[in-house]
Amino acid sequence: MTTPSPCVAVCVLDPSTGWCKGCYRTIGEIAGWLQMSEAERRAVVAALAGRRAAAGAKSAAPPPG
């Protein structure tokens, strides 16, 4: 079974994390997706939930001051 791309067509990189705001992959992971092995793809997908949570926690933080 081929791991599907997590792309959701919201292709904007967050400059502070380097992650896409839609799928939470790095530009390297996005560009290299087709060349990755299934194990590499599964590893990337496994990391996405943690990245999404970290990005949500960052955006939910109150403004300084």
Image (spheres, grey):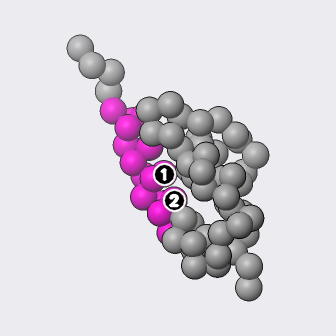
Q: Looking at the magenta stretch, what is its main secondary structure?
A: helix
Instruction: Where is residue 36? Give x, y as percent.
Output: 65, 69
Instruction: Where is residue 29? Give x, y as percent.
Output: 60, 55
Q: Is residue 50 above or below residue 40?
A: above
Helix, strand or loop at mark 1: helix
- Name the residue rendered at 23%, 14% in the picture: 65
- Name the residue rendered at 38%, 37% in the picture: 58
Residue type, label 1 = Arg
Tell me if 15 is positioned left or right of 28 in this view.
left
Circle on res. 48: 2
Tell me if 44 is positioned left or right of 7 in this view.
left
Question: Which of 61 and 32 lies nearest the eye of the viewer?
Answer: 32
Q: Is residue 26 above or below residue 50?
A: above
Could you give the CA–CA distance between mark 1 and mark 2, rounded to whole angstroms?
Answer: 6 Å
Name the residue that disc number 1 marks.
Answer: 52
Instruction: Where is residue 1? Give x, y as percent.
Output: 74, 85
Question: Which of 55 and 2 lies nearest the eye of the viewer?
Answer: 2
Q: Are marks 1 and 2 in contact (CB under 8 Å)?
A: yes
- Residue 63's image quarter? top left
* Disc 2: CA contacts within 10 A as few (<14), some (14-19) or many (>=20): some
Residue type, label 2 = Leu
The outermost residue toward the left is 65
* Disc 1: CA contacts within 10 A as few (<14), some (14-19) or many (>=20): some
Q: Is residue 60 above or below residue 5?
A: above
- Residue 55 painted magenta: yes
Tell me if 61 is positioned left or right of 3 in this view.
left
- Name the residue rendered at 52%, 71% in the picture: 43
- Name the residue rendered at 53%, 34% in the picture: 14
- Residue 50's image quarter? bottom left
Circle on res. 25: none
- Specify start and end residues of the magenta stretch as a single range: 46-61
